[in-house]
Image (spheres, coloured by chain):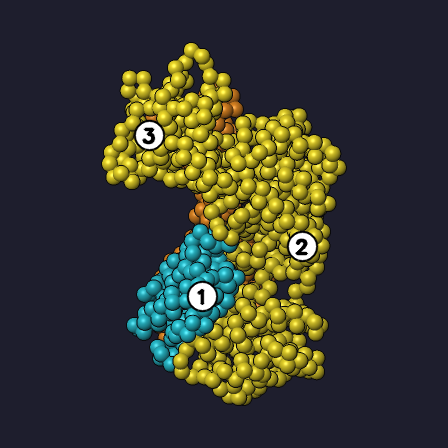
Amino acid sequence: MTGQNKKIIAFCCAESAYRAADRAGRLGIHYPDNVRVIRVPCAGRVSVLHILKAFEKGAAGVLVMGCQEGACRHLTGNIRAKERAKYAEDLLKEVGINGQRVKVVNFGPDMAQKFAREIEEMVEKIKEE
Amino acid sequence: MVIAERKPLGEIRNMLAGYKRILVVGCGTCVTICWAGGEKEVGILSSQLRLASSKDGNELSIIEAVVERQCEKEMVEELRDKVQEVDAILSMGCGVGVQTIADIFEEKPIFPALNTTFIGMPEAEGLWTEKCGACGDCLLYWTGGICPVVRCAKGLLNGPCGGTRKGGKCEIDPEKDCAWVLIYRRLERQGRLDLMRKYYEPKNYRAVKRPGKVQAMQA
Amino acid sequence: MPVKIGLFLCDCGGSLRNIDFPKIRENLAKLEDIAFVKISHNLCLEEGEKAIASRILGENVIRVVIAACSPELCEDKFMRLLEGLGLNPNLLSIANIREQCSWAHERDVTKKALELIRMAVNKARLLQAVERGEVPVNKEVLVVGGGFSGVKSALELSQLGIRTTIVERESALGGKLRELGGFYGVETSPKEMLGSMIKAIEEDKNIEVLTSAEVARVQGGAGDFTVRIRKGGKESSRSFGAIIFATGYRTEILPQDFEVEPGGNIISQQKLVQMLQAPKKSERRPETIGFALDFSDENCRLPTLSTLNNALLVKEKLGSEVYVFCKNLKVDSEGAEKLYQEARDRGVVFLKFEKPPQIYGENGQVKVEAKDVLLGEEVTLLCDLLVAEEKTLPSEGTESLSSMLNLEIDSRGFYQAENIHLYPVASERKGIYFVGNCRGDLDLARASTDVSSAVMNIYEFLSPEGAIVEVEKVKADPQKCRACLTCIRICPHKAIQLVRVDSEKWVAKIYDLACDRCGICAAICPAKAIKFEGYSDEQILAEVEAIGEGL
């Protein structure tokens, strides 16, 4: 396994990112296998607590993947996710976990390449420890 | 209601240094509402503490709990079983809650995770502002419902200081509205400008009775 | 007693070769609460369905985990299958071992597949049944605005047997139909159109009309709106299941574009039409008339129509030289291209610019200086009259009405925040719709389409099927709720309200019909009082836990 058993948890919104991930599989676009996707109805469902617990349970990086700004069906879900991720990053810094381990990414449902790229990028980042 | 905010993690960890088993207890009233010490915040702080401890290689076991109102002896009493299993208590309640728990469980060290800041209300999402200074001598009738004790930077009781900036902003803090401009406009709107003629003697802070006591009539 | 879970693994016709299914089965069968692990080749085909049915009925499982292709493809199908077998459809958890596992990685993915299935199992253990039930829905509709779109909405709804009430703030119905001279490309005049509409309304028993009336307050949510209507100084309360906003538009010459002085030679379209219809004998015939179009922004559908039409009118009545200064021509309305061609054929000259022209007054004429994009040159023209563009803007009162209802307006003040999920007629609040020019610069045909669209949406919404919901799928626990009002304030669909429970305590109540199941409230609740079944904190964290567990 890549990244020496280190895992990334990607919370993916059902409207966009989850579909982009599916599409990557369908198009045969490969990416590192140490990512675990958790499907959520909206990026706004993900709370700061979920992000922290993910790290508590051993995740080395967390991605929160939602719709593009202005295209969230629930208007502000993706924007809230962005703010919560920033807050979670600050909380993690307080604990001594630095280095942008939490990232929010905006997707359209067809962005298969982007999905794969984001996973690769985060995997690279968590290798630097 | 009472508004509080969480202390930085570093400060909290310093307090807890050496303790291996702790109870993190939130309060379900004011601090839940101002997002400082409710069940979710208890979860977040506990998560941070566990992450930090495991990073440092220290042992730390945490019991999480929430009391409906930490300022009530009967409700705090419900923590008894949990308190027996820990070496120290970290309260996420306001200063009153911390002290109530301390009084009930005298033998256990208790630490405050929050700084209690003021009495206030929500102004915008996630933003709480101070409205009342608990001065014990409310003069809101004379000031059209706007408190100069808290909202005037100098706490003036008899009109503006004369240093009001352009746009009705405070001389000391240009981000703030001058309270007396607000008071004037409010009274003007209500047609009660004559109330501004009332003269207030300076408050006598020397003989302030602390701690305050209020005895209500028996119902 | 541990929950009995039935586990089905699909190898997609044997094609998922990088997963060792027997190894997975071996690992999972060890778990105490797994009743069985069945490997299938095609769960989605009849043979697969039969296998699921026989196993579930045979072994009395109460939770089901399926490891197969993406839930995007199979979730609905398997949920219906379970329902048919007497099991609550929400007691199903799906692990995506195809698109997001086998197909996404090259090497052996048995370990990852196993983990994904463990995640689904962990979640399944905590799933609770959610029942479907019918919510009482008020079948009457409120139409705010009695112009073309509002009246048409009421008439079309009536044809489907739905009763409506039109609330119009003027003293008579009609809106812009009472003002406009004619429609481009439409034979019937606005006056005739209005006449026949009003006749139809008067004869329609399903439609109630309140003129000189306004909406004062709206409470409640989809299926049950309580509206206070103010008429003649008095207010009355009415209940409606859905609301259509058809509050229309106004036109305005934007001050940043032009300064129009009375008696000057920069005039409005209206003034031009007046002049053409009733020319003063004493006035000299203007030899050159210029039209300004699309100076400040490209929302110029209606201005384009009036410009083209009036340019032709000028040619017909005065025979003057006509120039149209424009950045863009919005000719996507029905008949607009034809109108443009006709104008060109009649000798109307179109000057296309990139930067808005400079306008000066000179010796009683209007001097227009612009760089013509096609010529690539600076062009200067002297016009006797310049007709200013009148922008389409939302009606007066749109802003206050929208804030009363907590609805977003876009950057131009029109309803319906610029969000692709809402187009064409929906709002972020279920049960509330926008039709016609209150949501943009639309022509008649588009406004008509809006009406039909909204009417069909409402018909569905008010039908018996429309009232069926998953009851209390997202619920605020009255014991834990502190009435902090956070969820009520931030719900993007305004589906949460403060209610009294047991005549005492105030708690937040989430209305199933209005709720769009996003979970933003559950994430933000500081007391963790809101449970979103299927995506609760515990269920999400159970998935996270499985990731840490390893093999």
**Mark 3 — on which chain does it sit?**
B
- Disc 3 marks a residue whose amino acid type is Arg
Note whether residue A50 is visible.
Answer: no
Note whether residue C39 is visible.
Answer: yes
Are the numbered discs 2 and 3 placed on the same chain, yes or no? no
Please name the residue that numbered disc 2 is placed on: C466
Eyeballing the image, is C189 above or below C63? above
Q: State the hue of chain C.
A: yellow
Q: In the picture, one chain is orange; tell me its letter.
A: B
Q: Nearer the viewer, residue C234 or C369?
A: C369
Give the quarter of the image for residue C85.
Answer: bottom right
Task: Please tell me how crowded label 2 is: few (under 14), some (14-19), or many (20+) other residues with Cα within 10 Å.
Answer: some
Looking at the image, residue C79 sits to the left or right of residue A67; the answer is right
Looking at the image, residue B4 sits to the left or right of residue C513; the answer is left
State the CA–CA distance, disc 1 to disc 3: 55 Å
Give the quarter of the image for residue C201.
Answer: top right
Q: Position of residue A26 (x, y in %)?
A: 45, 72
Give the quarter of the image for residue B56.
Answer: bottom left
Q: In the picture, one chain is cyan; tell me its letter.
A: A
**Mark 1 — on which chain does it sit?**
A
Between label 1 and label 3, give the one nearer the viewer.
1
Looking at the image, residue C117 sits to the left or right of residue C254; the answer is right
Q: Which mark is residue A20?
A: 1
Residue shown at 66% from the left, 32% from the top: C196
